[in-house]
Image (cartoon, grey):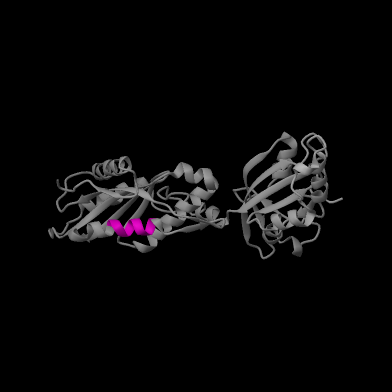
């Protein structure tokens, strides 16, 4: 009897001999449901052999093109798992082994899998014992492909002035950039201004709760990458911390500052697809101008924009407050 059929029988035999209370799930129906999942799911024996896999797992792990595929390192293993540093992962740290060793569920384990073509796929894995009371229990391992977010994290610059998640300049870099900008000979054309925008994404906790932290990180990274592409040099996009970002916009027409703000909000609300889910972000934005001959420091200007951002949040978020607005 396969795992699906066995599980079905157990469900029917439970609940005090009242099988009529359970829906009539047959093995084919359950297989169809599992194959419809976007994420991979495998059932692994206590020895580490993959006994069943849904279509996503077959595709992600390339099981059809491998022989003797197991989740253990042994003579027949054709899957190589990696730690986040790229080193070969010890068998004791595999998700299935950790579930067996702890006798409980494990979640959020990120491992790399070397593909047949030599590339690497990164997976966020969860594992749970199918029968916790059985020392020989199979383990159900589910996973999602997080290669894109892992690649973004690897873009961390060795100079310590780049954000690990997005590859954007960090606060240290942005402060130095603004101070250098303040120290240059500036045009006295009062129709042109530089603008510092502090952008704080609203409801990040809810986003992380629905997508998981890696999914939330991916949504942030994809959205800010869109900002960076649409606001190229000489403009600058940087990350402060968490969900807070800074944009330094150069030589903006004074009369067009509000239009630029509206443009940023449109960019932020364009949907991103995360694991098959359409995600729309919105943000509270505060902005402050850098005037010709401005005597403030970069920290003072950022603080002004940040104060405006916090005021925008108290008004419900999703729009901009201008620190320098008159009246």
Whole-percent x and y of residue 34? 70, 54
Quadrant holding the C terminus: top left
Residue farthest right in this picture = 1
Q: Residue at x 84, y 51 (%)?
A: 2
- Nearest the viewer among 144 and 295 is 144
In the figure, is residue 28 to the left or right of 123? right
In the figure, is residue 255 to the left or right of 44? left
Magenta stretch: dominant secondary structure: helix
Q: How many marks?
A: 0
Whole-percent x and y of residue 37? 65, 55
Q: Residue at x 15, y 53 (%)?
A: 292
Whole-percent x and y of residue 313? 33, 42
Quadrant of res 21: top right
Give the residues in magenta: 261-268
Q: Residue at x 82, y 50 (%)?
A: 5
Q: Does the magenta run of residues contain 267?
A: yes
Is residue 300 in view? yes
Q: Residue at x 14, y 51 (%)?
A: 293
Quadrant of res 79: bottom right
Is residue 157 in view? no
Whole-percent x and y of residue 286? 28, 47
- Nearest the viewer among 313 and 214 is 313
In the figure, is residue 297 to the left or right of 68? left
Q: Does the magenta run of residues contain 264?
A: yes
């Amino acid at each position: 009897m396969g795992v699906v059929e066995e599980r079905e029988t157990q469900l029917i035999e439970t609940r005090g001999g009242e099988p009529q209370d359970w829906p009539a799930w047959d093995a084919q129906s359950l297989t169809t449901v599992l194959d419809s999942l976007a994420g991979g799911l495998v059932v692994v024996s206590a020895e580490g052999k993959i006994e069943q896999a849904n279509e996503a797992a077959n595709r992600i792990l390339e099981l059809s093109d491998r022989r003797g595929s197991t989740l253990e390192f042994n003579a027949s293993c054709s899957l190589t798992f990696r730690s986040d540093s790229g080193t070969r992962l010890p068998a004791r740290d595999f998700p299935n082994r950790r579930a067996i060793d702890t006798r409980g569920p494990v979640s959020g384990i990120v491992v790399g899998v070397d593909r047949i073509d030599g590339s690497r796929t990164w997976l966020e894995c969860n594992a749970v014992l199918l029968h916790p009371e059985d020392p020989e229990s199979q383990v159900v391992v589910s996973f999602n492909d997080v290669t894109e977010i892992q690649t973004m994290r690897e873009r961390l610059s060795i100079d310590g002035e780049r954000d690990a998640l997005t590859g954007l300049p960090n606060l240290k870099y942005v402060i130095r950039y603004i101070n250098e900008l303040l120290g240059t000979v500036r045009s006295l054309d009062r129709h042109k201004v530089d603008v510092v925008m502090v952008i704080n994404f609203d409801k990040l906790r809810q986003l992380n709760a629905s997508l998981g932290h890696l999914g939330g990180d991916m949504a942030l990274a994809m959205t800010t990458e869109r900002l960076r592409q649409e606001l190229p040099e000489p403009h600058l996009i940087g990350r402060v911390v968490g969900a807070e970002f800074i944009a330094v916009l150069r030589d903006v027409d004074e009369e067009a500052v509000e239009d630029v703000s509206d443009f940023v909000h449109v960019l932020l609300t364009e949907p991103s697809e995360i694991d098959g889910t359409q995600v729309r972000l919105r943000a509270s934005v505060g902005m402050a101008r850098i005037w010709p001959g401005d005597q403030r420091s970069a920290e003072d200007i950022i603080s002004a924009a940040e104060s405006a951002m916090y005021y925008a949040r108290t008004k419900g978020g999703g729009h901009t407050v201008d620190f320098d607005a008159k009246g």
